[in-house]
Every structure is written in C-alpha cells, then in structure tokens.
Amino acid sequence: MTRGFQVDAFGGPELMIWREITLPVLGAHDIEVIVKASGVNFAEVRMRAGDYGGQEIPFIMGMEASGIVKTVGAEVEDFSVGDRVFGRARGTHAESVIFTDEHLMHLPDRLSFVEGAAIAVGWLTAWHALHTVARIKSGQRVLIEAVGGSVGSAALQIAKEAHCWVAGTASTDEKLASARQWGSDLTVNYCRQSVIDEIMTATDGLGADVSLMTIGQATATDLIDSMGMDGKVVMFGSTGGRDITFNLKIGILNLQLLSMSISTSPDFMSLTMPDFKSRALPLFAEGLLKPVVDTVLPMSELVKAHEMIASRQHFGKIIMTNDNV
C-alpha cells in the first residue's frame, strides 16, 4: 500500500485527494520506483477537469517522475534495486509508481531527481517532433510556439544543439526574456507583435523551415503564413482548443502538416526512445542539454501547481518533490 493523489470525479483542483492507493501487481517487465520528484504537465490539468480524451475515473495524477528502483519484475534486465531512474508512467504524483522497463531510463549522475523529473514528457515530445517527425537538419530555421512551455523550452535547446536558427513565441515578455537566455535567436510576443512580420524580416522573407504548433486557432494562421517553401508544421498539442482553420496557401508553399502524439505513435518506441537514449542522454550527462525547472514545490502543494500551470506564467517545468508530503 502506498499513497497518491487520486481523482474520483472530474472538476477543480480540490478534487485531487491524497489517499492510500493500491499499486498494480508487478508484471515481468515492470519496475516499482520510489518517487523522489514528479513533473506537472498541462495535460494533467485537462485530465483532472475531464477535458482529456479517453481519461476514465478514478485515476492517480501524474505522468512522469524520477526516483529510486524499489522492486524489479522477473524479466527486467537493465535495472536493479537502488538505481536512480526517470521516465514516463501514469500515477506519478504518489509515493511509489509502477513503470514498464521500456519507458524507464537511468538518471545521469550529473542530474538531480528534480532535474530528472523535468525531462520525460516535454523532452521526449520535443525530440519526437523535431527529430523523428520533422527530421531537422543543421542550418534550418525553426519556429517554436509557446517556447516557455515544457515542450517548447526543450525544443529550443534541441534545435540549438542541432545547429538550427530558432524563433520562439510566447504571450509575455518575461517568458521571452528567459527564451533569449536559453539561446533563442528571435523572440516574438504574439499578443502584441506580428509573428509573420517578425519572422519574415528576420529571415529575409524566407520564412521558417520547421514549426511546432500547439496553441491552436488563435495563432494557427500567423504560424502557417510564417512558413517558407517546403516547410513542415508539426502539431503536437491543443492548449488553445482542438479546432483550427487554414487556407489553401499551404499548397502554394508545398507545406507538410504533420500531427503527432508520443502516446500513440508507432515510431515513438521503435525510433524516438532508442534515439533519445543513445544521443540525448549523453548530452545531459555532459551538461550540454539541461532540464529547465521553473518552480519546485512539495507534493502537498499540487493544487498550487495546477493553479500555476493554468495561469501559464512559468518557463519550463513545475516539479513536485515527495520530501514534505
């Protein structure tokens, strides 16, 4: 028996209740991990509110964590009791959680548990979008919507590490200042600046080669009109709503509209995970890639974390730690 934040009915943050929960029976390829830190994601706000497709109740909050291996299944080969690990799993806002071994990774010695908890969802989504789906190349121009978010802030570093020129958009100047500190070549406040004008001026009219779309209808037209010939638009989220419209200028520009989800993509486990382990983890170990952590809170303040996520004022990740529950 362990404890975690359970949701029995969709609604406000007050419906996340810290209580005793029963973990699933450990399978042959399962690993029980003592949670040291857990990342908070916008998707979880939607899950709790009942606005996330396919989510059933009751469920335990949380989608990613870092911690220490407690128990391993009979056929687990790459992990041992006591290992420092991180990865994606459901139910990570808890004292312990069950991972499948294919979704778990060893935490580089350089990284703390807090930093480890900031990687799995945002960085794997960004890596899948840029490398697996868009197949970015050195020298390309990359436009990142919501550059202050979990995925956007990771995508910024990934694109810069790939030697791309990067533009990031956000709704506040504070987020854009942080994006510049992390290497963004151009920043645009889409609430008061023309994304099209800024991108076209900065690129001498060439436009972006690759863009990451996540906001939705409010910015979709400007993003598409900021693209260059043969560009790729990768759609990975719907923070501003699921429905968008666009005109057939996409045909004149020969644009590719590419949608993705790491939860359902067949290429995620076969291509992205092994690629991330072989190329990204060494970069984290060397300090060339760095998790972006905005705020660290005790697990007991999960309601506050959800309020912060909903206000969209943070840059990078909000992390919960188990020390003070």
Image (cartoon, rainbow, N blue to C red):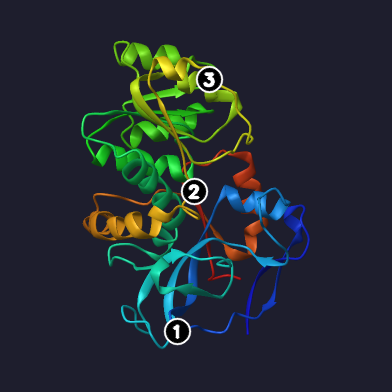
- Dot 3 alpha-carbon crowd within 10 angstroms: few under 14, some 14 to 19, many 20 or more: some
Which residue is denoted by mark 3 in the rendering? 221
The numbered disc on residue 261 is 2
How far, Cα to Cα, is label 3 from label 2? 22 Å
Q: Residue at x 41, y 14 (%)?
A: 252
Query: Do the residues under discs 3 and 2 have CB atoms within 8 angstroms?
Result: no
Work out whether residue 24 or residue 155 is closer to the camera in this orientation and state it: 24
The numbered disc on residue 28 is 1
316 vs 321: above or below: above
Decide which of tag 3 and tag 2 comes sooner along the chain. Answer: 3
Q: Residue at x 63, y 65 (%)?
A: 300
Q: How many marks?
A: 3
How far, Cα to Cα, is label 1 from label 3? 48 Å
218 vs 15: above or below: above
Q: Where is residue 116 shown, x and y percent of the image?
A: 39, 61
- Dot 1 alpha-carbon crowd within 10 angstroms: few under 14, some 14 to 19, many 20 or more: few
Q: Where is residue 126 shown, x and y percent of the image?
A: 40, 45
Q: Which quadrant of the rendered structure holds the N terminus?
A: bottom right
24 vs 41: above or below: below
Work out whether residue 95 or residue 27 is closer to the camera in this orientation and state it: 27
Give the amino acid at mark 1: Ala
Decide which of tag 1 and tag 3 comes sooner along the chain. Answer: 1
Give the amino acid at mark 2: Ser
Q: Which quadrant of the rendered structure holds the C terminus?
A: bottom right
Secondary element at image label 2: loop
